[in-house]
Image (spheres, grey):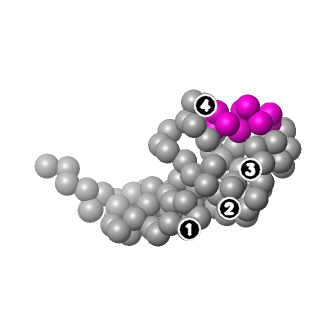
Amino acid sequence: MQRVFIKEWRESVGMTQQELGDAINPPASAGTISSYESGARNLSMERLRQVAVALGTTRGALLDFPPAGERKASGAGEGEVFDLWHRIKIEDRPRALRALKVFVDEG
């Protein structure tokens, strides 16, 4: 998994690692939260969602930028695309994927 900004978001809301761990289900230890923050342990998308909810943000924000940071100059980050993808109806996803491929150099 790519770098996530859990520590920055956690600190911005004034939570300790233990408080964040207690706010997700099933609860996690401060050590587990530390390993998420350092990248030593990957998060499932469901666990990432739980962390985002506990921090009052979105999965996309955790993946894209720190709370005081600006979005990448190139526009939407990977996490924002991820959040949008899951809002697209399943039957419309093949069409959305074709549209995205227009922007990729497949040559």
Asked if residue 87 is positioned above or below residue 40 in the image, the reply reads below
Q: Nearer the viewer, mark 3 or mark 4?
A: 4
In space, the residues marked 3 and 4 are separated at their CA atoms by: 16 Å
Question: Pointers 2 and 1 in contact (CB under 8 A)?
Answer: yes
* Element carrying mark 2: helix
Question: Pointers 3 and 4 in contact (CB under 8 A)?
Answer: no
Residue on which the image places disc 1 = 68
The disc labelled 3 sits on which kind of residue? Gln
Asked if residue 1 is positioned above or below residue 16 in the image, the reply reads above
Q: Residue at x 84, y 39 (%)?
A: 27
Numbered mark located on residue 50 in the image: 3
Nearer-N-terminus badge (2/3): 2
Instruction: Find out whether residue 34 is within the magenta segment.
Output: yes
In space, the residues marked 3 and 1 are separated at their CA atoms by: 21 Å
Identify which residue, 19 or 23, lies in the foreground.
Answer: 19
**Coordinates of residue 16 in the picture (x, y in percent):** 78, 48
Question: Pointers 3 and 1 in contact (CB under 8 A)?
Answer: no
The disc labelled 4 sits on which kind of residue? Arg
Residue on which the image places disc 2 = 12
Residue on which the image places disc 4 = 41
Nearer-N-terminus badge (3/1): 3
The disc labelled 2 sits on which kind of residue? Ser
